[in-house]
Amino acid sequence: TKILHPHPERADWLVAEFKDRATAFNAQKVAEIAGKGELNARISALLFQRLAAQGLPTCFVQAGDAPNRLVFKRLAMLPIEVVV
């Protein structure tokens, strides 16, 4: 999961803070896993960079000011949740 914060300098950007929280069974089980947020942010950044390298536009802007944060352009979200 992530927490979205307004960007301190640009109103059209958001800072996504990736949390160390892990859930299972539709949040019936919850745990904190140290470093999970940082790892998820790194993987997400790599995936967005690969998409950009293939010429696909994304909302990714750059890494944030902490290892578990990324900066994205604001966009309209579709209210869909998938639980696997």
Image (spheres, rainbow, N blue to C red):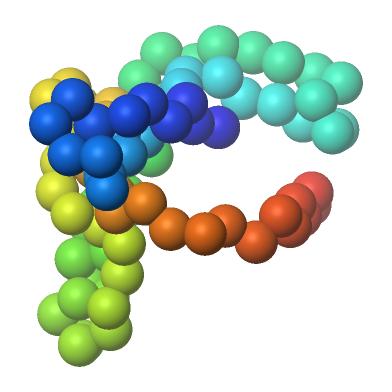
In the depicted view, which residue is nearer to us: 73 or 29?
A: 73
Q: Would residue 76 be visible to someone looking at this image?
A: yes
Residue 13 is drawn in which quadrant?
top left
Left or right: residue 41 versus residue 26 is left
In the depicted view, which residue is nearer to us: 64 or 84?
A: 64
Task: Report the residue at 35% width, 20% height from top.
Answer: 35
Residue 48 drawn at (x, y percent)? 28, 64
Image: 8 above or below 39: above
Residue 72 drawn at (x, y percent)? 29, 49
Q: Would residue 70 be visible to someone looking at this image?
A: no
Left or right: residue 75 versus residue 79 is left
Give the quarter of the figure containing the N terminus. Answer: top right
Residue 12 drawn at (x, y percent)? 27, 48
Residue 58 drawn at (x, y percent)? 31, 70
The residue at the far front in this view is: 11
Image: 63 above or below 81: above
The residue at the far bottom in this view is: 55
Image: 78 above or below 24: below
In the depicted view, which residue is nearer to us: 82 or 75?
A: 75
Task: Report the residue at 25% width, 40% height from top.
Answer: 11
Task: Report the residue at 80% width, 18% height from top.
Answer: 29
Left or right: residue 26 versus residue 22 is right
Task: Report the residue at 64% width, 13% height from top.
Answer: 31
Q: How many marks?
A: 0
